[in-house]
Amino acid sequence: MKLFSCQSCGQVLFFENTHCERCGHRLGYCTETGRLLALEPNADDNGWLAVGIDAQAPTRFLCTNAEYDVCNWLVPEGSSDALCMACRYNHVIPDLNKEGNQELWRSLEQAKHRLFYSLLLLNLPIPTRAENPTGGLVFSFPEDPENGEEKVMTGHDEGEITIALREADDAEREKMRVEMGEHYRTLLGHFRHEVGHFYWNILVRDAGHEDACRAMFGDHTQDYGAALQQHYENGPPAGWEEHYVSSYATTHPWEDFAETWAHYLHIVDTLQTAVSFGVAVSPTVAQDGSLSQSFNFDAYGAASFDELLVAWPPLTLAVNALNRSMGQPDLYPFVITPSITEKLRFVHDLVHGLPLPPVISAPQ
């Protein structure tokens, strides 16, 4: 994630900011330019005008969901939609008449907007339901039924991504994380994982890459329900860490792909953050320079996965050490083995439209 600056006063701004803390200007994220703009009201049409170097830009409008303090994005220029690029994909939102639901929705939207930030930078297709009625992307955030029936399950089904509302409750999510023995469970992680299933449909199935994906992740035609049941009954196989980025990835090739996809987005966005902060890692005890790394490249636009792979370990070692110094568990409790590296490289190549590994047929 990039850092931003106020065009009016130069104050450092963060992605979720709605107002500049120094000069008080309203802020709006512009998807066309990838910038957080300082705004002034235009009394003529109830819209907003960008200030500073963008003073000649046309009147812009905040997303309707800004009214609920859950969105700080601008409606794209020339759009007749009242919702921004991210909010227009919503299908089911929480009941805002219930106390606390607006705060939970805000947490969901912050994670979803970060997801869309990445999808837009990667120039990935984002078909709507209007464009693809049977597989376009939509999001639903339902809450569990009050009558004690089975809880809402987070998941993906032909373009519809469901994130259970309780996942936005930090205490509930942490409880589930511990009960399920997960090292890592976050709202943003859910969004990145579930959209991985969506892009398996778009970039693998519909693009004719199933054989290449099968060669890398395994046979996705195996019974998913049976695989899921076996995973929850027996857990991951011994030695799974060598080939899978998480224990859940061992469940089924679809889950392996989605977990790897999510992990790739974690890497790219975190590296962009390091670049934005001008981070440099150069521990003096590593005299051979093996852990020295400066971050000054475009992580989202990296032509080769090797560029990301070289930069990633020094950064994760540093942030883990910082967390331990604060008495916190490792921020990055993962090990990228050669096998996992090739899976991440596959996702990178798929995202950037690069040639995938050749499929080698078994001898007859």
Image (tube, helix red, strand yellow):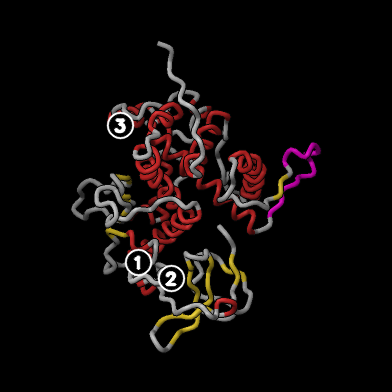
Q: Earlier in the sequence, mark 1 or mark 2?
A: 2
Residue 157 image position (x, y, % from top left): 28, 44
Residue 171 in sight in this render: yes
Q: Which residue is mark 3?
A: 224
Q: Which residues are magenta?
A: 279-291
Secondary structure at badge 2 equals loop
Q: Earlier in the sequence, mark 3 or mark 2?
A: 2
As drawn, 149 above or below 32: above
Answer left or right for 150 relative to 75. left
Query: Which label lies toward us, 3 or 2?
Result: 2
The type of residue carrying mark 3 is: Tyr
Q: Main structural element of the magenta stretch: helix, strand or loop?
A: loop
Q: Which residue is mark 1?
A: 102
Q: Earlier in the sequence, mark 1 or mark 3?
A: 1
The residues bearing labels 3 and 2 have C-alpha atoms spaced at a distance of 40 Å
Marks 3 and 2 close (CB-CB < 8 Å): no
Q: Which mark is residue 351?
A: none
> Residue farthest to the bottom?
44
The residues bearing labels 1 and 2 have C-alpha atoms spaced at a distance of 20 Å
Query: Where the C terminus falls, by quadrant?
Result: top left
**Residue ID at (53%, 27%):** 242
Residue 174 in sight in this render: no
As drawn, 73 above or below 275: below
Circle count: 3
The residues bearing labels 1 and 3 have C-alpha atoms spaced at a distance of 35 Å
As drawn, 106 above or below 165: below
Tell me the crowding category of disc 3: few under 14, some 14 to 19, or many 20 or more residues within 10 angstroms, Cα based.
some
Secondary structure at badge 1 equals helix
Q: Nearer the viewer, residue 277 or 210?
A: 210
Query: Which label lies toward us, 1 or 2?
Result: 2
Q: Which residue is mark 2?
A: 74
